[in-house]
Image: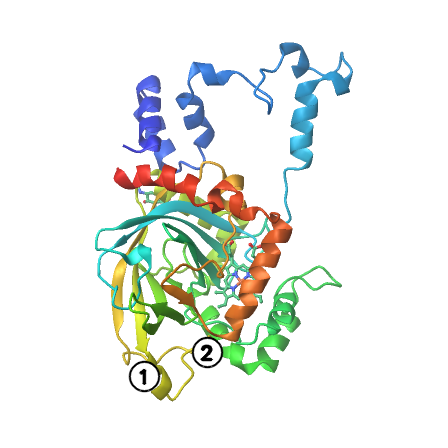
Amino acid sequence: MRLSTIILGVVGLVSGVEDDLAFMRSDPAAHQLVAYKMSIKEERKTLTISNGAPVDYRDTNSLNDNLILNPYFLDSIMHMTQERIPERIVHTKGAGAFGYFEVTHDIQKYCKAKLFEYIGKKTPLVVRFSTSIQDRGSSDLWREARGYAVKFYTEDGNWDMVGFNTPVYFYKDPQYFVGFVHSQKKNQVTAVRDINAIFDFLTLRPETLHEFLWIFSDIGIPDGYRRMSGFSIHTYELVNEHGESHFARFHFITDQGIKNIPTELALQISAQDADYAIRDLYNAIANGSFPSWTMYIEVMSKEEVEKADFDPFDVTLLWPKGHYPLLPVGKLILNRNPSNYFADVEKVAMNPGHLVPGIAGPPDKMFEGRVLAYKDAQNYRLGVNHNKIPVNCLCMPVLIIEMDCRL
Ligand code: HEM
Ligand SMILES: *[C@@H]1O[C@H](CO)[C@@H](O)[C@H](O)[C@H]1NC(C)=O
């Protein structure tokens, strides 16, 4: 049984009020504190500072003493003044969750990665879905591409698949990233969003039109993160145990069905609940409606790549529909909320350069640029030891999540 179910069950017994219980179940995010209060054991009710020592009752009031000699004041104020780290430049606002990937179809003739070893194999993972240009406090329902990033904790290391909810990207030269991001974020002189900058970029770099058409279509405002699909966009080189290569794009098709929000309604919701998409994901997992996606690979052989009359590695293009096999691989299922959003989501370091044996990575220039940029961003944002932070480290999440996988 899930912890949240147990907690809500206990609340029900204690209060005996079915109406209250139904109310709490309707929006677990809104009632997290109440559920937490009901769940904590007596021995955990002691307030401690970071070295584990209980707070002396006298120190909870700082008026009568020298502040420097009040360990509770010093410890808590210094955690508060330093409780922010630099926000991500892009994909700043996001929602995270844990879960697992389960293989349903054998693709070992294409890829030897441990993740795909046998049908039924489960690999723990963490996802982070995000808006792309919004600042931390903005609405989840702005019209733009959404990030779809997955970190698979495989036995051969972590594989990060860092994609979008659209199957293509804006341009294929990583040099454009700087100007592009600046054109989408707030004008550096006025500090407000500048529609001229956005349309200058679009019209002066016509290859961006394809991705902008996706964004100006209905899927530009997904109804929460559960109801959108995810795409690697890049064409990855996959290697099998004989050292043979194939080339594939990864698609994660939502099992909840695609659902979007019309612009007017998105504006209304944004005014009341800027965290609409984060809340929706949290609540769905807390109430046991675990969201899932079916992973497919769209595959080309080396010979097909050589013969193709288009560039299969061009991230601004789709492959012609129906020409190359689209093979189901498995299910991605989310079944656990973060226990601390800062530790589990803010500190996750998704880096497309995190590859594993069998997944050689995409050979295109954009990918080369990305491998550099994410590492640099994370060295700055989280420090050079970012892969030692529990959510980014192989050992700890595996221990926790494997237990969930067995339930
Ligand atoms: C196919 C094209 C691209 C896709 C699908 C993509 C997707 C994403 C996603 C989903 C994130 C958020 C990761 C998270 O949730 O933590 C992200 C962050 C980021 N992206 Fe990209 N991106 C693309 C191209 C690029 C390029 C070309 C660059 C630069 C050369 C770049 C630089 C960054 C940086 C610096 C971050 C912040 C990383 C961090 O602070 O952890 N991206 N991108
Ligand atoms: C669970 O939560 C999601 C998101 O709020 C909601 O759409 C769904 O109807 C809920 N399901 C149940 C069984 O309460």
Image x and y of residue 49, in percent: 60, 22
Q: Residue at x 38, y 32 (%)?
A: 24
Image x and y of residue 350, in percent: 49, 54
| As drawn, 274 above or below 373 | above
**Residue type (three-letter) at the residue carrying disc 1:** Glu
- Could you say which quadrant of the image residue 309 lies in? bottom left
- Specify the farthest residue to the front: 242
Q: Secondary structure at mark 2?
A: loop
Q: Quadrant of the C terminus?
A: top left
Q: Mark 1 or mark 2: name the one nearer the start of the chain.
A: 1
Q: Nearer the viewer, residue 338 or 160?
A: 160
Q: Nearer the viewer, residue 145 or 405?
A: 405
| As drawn, 280 above or below 192 | above
Q: Which residue is mark 1?
A: 303
Q: Which mark is residue 314?
A: 2
What colour scheme has been applied to the protein in the rendered image? rainbow
Is residue 195 found left or right of 368 in the rendered image?
right
Give the CA separation, mark 1 to mark 2: 17 Å
**Residue type (three-letter) at the residue carrying disc 2:** Asp
Image x and y of residue 100, in percent: 33, 48
The reply to whether residue 405 is visible in this rendering is yes
Q: Which mark is residue 34?
A: none
Image x and y of residue 176, in percent: 61, 73
Is residue 50 found left or right of 163 in the rendered image?
right
The reply to whether residue 89 is visible in this rendering is no
Q: Residues within 10 Å of mark 1 (few under 14, many from 20)?
A: few
